[in-house]
Amino acid sequence: MNITIDREVLLENLNIISRGLPNKSPMPIITGIKFYATDVDLFMTSSNNDISVEVTVSDQSLNIVEAGSTVVPGRLFIDIIRKINSKKVNLFLSDDRILIIKADRGEYKLHIMDALEYPKIDFVPLENPLVLHSDIIKSLVKETVFATAQTEKKPILAGVNFSHNGGNLVVTATDSFRLSQKITSIAEYSDFNLTIPNKSLDELVKALDNYDGDVSLYFTQNRLLAQFRNVCFQTRLLEGNYPDTSRLIPSTFPIVIKFNKDELVEAVERVSLLSPRDKERDKEITYSIIKLSIRKDRTVEISTNNTVYGDAREEVIPTYVDAENPITIGFSSRYLLEALKSFMSTEISLNLTGEIRPFVIRGEKDANLTQLILPVRMD
Amino acid sequence: MNITIDREVLLENLNIISRGLPNKSPMPIITGIKFYATDVDLFMTSSNNDISVEVTVSDQSLNIVEAGSTVVPGRLFIDIIRKINSKKVNLFLSDDRILIIKADRGEYKLHIMDALEYPKIDFVPLENPLVLHSDIIKSLVKETVFATAQTEKKPILAGVNFSHNGGNLVVTATDSFRLSQKITSIAEYSDFNLTIPNKSLDELVKALDNYDGDVSLYFTQNRLLAQFRNVCFQTRLLEGNYPDTSRLIPSTFPIVIKFNKDELVEAVERVSLLSPRDKERDKEITYSIIKLSIRKDRTVEISTNNTVYGDAREEVIPTYVDAENPITIGFSSRYLLEALKSFMSTEISLNLTGEIRPFVIRGEKDANLTQLILPVRMD
């Protein structure tokens, strides 16, 4: 193999390839990037347990002097290309199992691995795509993925569920204490129900970072392939049935209060500084519990009591109140903050049904986005 | 105590006070900030094992309704004031050992500690100052502190030595593998020799961040007090005799090479990516050893050999070479990078005396700044 390419083009593709590199692996070959140069194109591949990425480079700056293939140490190779500031990079595979990187007055000789040992990756056939715009994918993930479970207790909840039924795409995430759901209509496509690991979605969004355009999605029973530009990004799907969440979201709300979102966020952040840390429900994550009260005079108070350090109280002026009686709910401030940050609306509404019943957050400009939080019982 | 003050003024002073707060302490009172309001001024104090800070606030926005004193949980109090975005803050000490912070529609009640339990801090008397400009102090620290020892093996080497003898202030730091030294002339003052802990100097530089002006330094046998604006910043000094380093720096150099500093930094950073990690000399810090060779044709090569991943080689074009014979030295790339970054000069010189003898780095525009590095023996 002997190729020359613009460093910037190579780096841009490596940034996408890096999404599929494992942090560590008992199989050294997997920590490498596979290069495969034909007479016209350069293919680069990375793969870990969840994600496989392949890019096809046919940039006009690419000059393939000699075809060939190899596997190079992944992160090290990317670090070198990142640090180099030459315009061109030459990659030359010498006979003695060494890849020579030449860039200006620098020369790097990397011990390579055998391309034949690299596992063969089965990509989903590129047939019958569901086409979504990259902006849609990015916002669907941003609106839901934070609500997935971070622990392995119920593996299926560590994914976001995409369910399609007669024109409506319902995207759902829940860790069983809160739920995010976005409903959106898509072009005609057969029904499907698949659950994508949260980490894969984070990586997909990063891979789409500099891309603005259509993405073709292909899937089988256990894999999803996102294809855009010169990139194939494939992830495994989570096995098992995603729980039916359709009955969890209340449909009528006797109590509705609306706020300026930023004012509410700031008040909650301040009060949270004093909220006691509750590790009961989930050992790995710290919850800080705050209270929200609608008082008799229809003012709203966010507060917390901390036996160690003291108490905090903020009055927030709602832009709208519809409540017959005073009510107080207690909940994780982190859940509320994460939910609020998923809205692009300036004004959001809190929709309550009772002190220990789930409440729902909606935004005037975020059609069909529902954030639901389960309150905790207050003393 | 009952005072009102502009939040911004309070926060600015708290940022300086935070320099003296311990991260943790077996004595809870020490993690607090002491407030002491007279009828005209507000004093705030923080203190840890090394550093004590006191600010005197007599800002025109300060309104002392009632004098008094208390100790509040330090980091929590600062976090709250930082998060508040009101213009004014009211601090009111209620009878039941609670400090009430009022800001706009927010109210925070902090459990306080007893001001009488706060340790009395002995500040150095403000007599006979040595006056240095804040810029001088900042650059003296930046040029030397990185070369102090990070371990506790030889406690005195974890400080920067300031020695004054007949008009010359000699500032020295060494971890016994490298040495930084800056000589500067100061106004008439009696001789002194003191060693300031590296962490205290880092905190002093942060405390001086927004200050541009003269700083008065006062010292005793074991303490140094820096006084500027409304701030008293005191640190303990390290005990013991600082080693005599005067004979370590060679005075004549048979080999001199000059480089564009940035080009050398970039080449060294790239080659370091492949340098083997050597933990022999100091278990806690990773060294990456690289080689610099002046070749027969007077070109200069930076290189490294890594049995695991491969080799790296960069040719750097010197702006000047004075060398009779080829020579190769090996050394820690981190030491060289940290030394190079201490210079403001565009062109720097490497001054060599032999393959295993200390070499010296100087900058054309950095008068009297010497960076010395001890090479390692290469195989």
Image (tube, coloured by chain):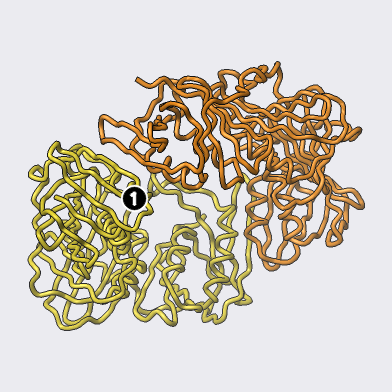
Chain colours: A yellow, B orange
* Foreground residue among B131 and B236: B131
Crowd around label 1: few <14 · some 14–19 · many ≥20 (10 Å): some
The location of residue B294, given as percent across then percent down, is: 42, 32
The image quadrant that residue B250 belongs to is: top right
Q: Give SS at disc 1.
A: loop
**Residue on which disc 1 sits:** A104
Is residue A57 something that shows in the picture? yes
Is residue A203 something that shows in the picture? no
The location of residue A338, given as percent across then percent down, is: 44, 63
The location of residue A136, given as percent across then percent down, is: 30, 75
* Foreground residue among A84 and B233: A84
* Foreground residue among B207 and B195: B195
Which residue is drawn at the image coordinates 83% and 24% (left, top)?
A: B191
The location of residue B78, given as percent across then percent down, is: 66, 51
Which residue is drawn at the image coordinates 64% and 32% (left, top)?
A: B198
The image quadrant that residue A60 belongs to is: bottom left
Q: Is residue A310 left or right of residue A52?
A: right
Which residue is drawn at the image coordinates 92% and 51% (left, top)?
A: B39
Q: For the residue marked with disc 1, what is the amino acid? A: Asp
Mark 1 — on which chain does it sit?
A
Number of numbered callouts drawn: 1
Q: Is residue B40 above or below residue A267?
A: above
Which residue is drawn at the image coordinates 40% and 29% (left, top)?
A: B289
* Foreground residue among B366 and A308: B366
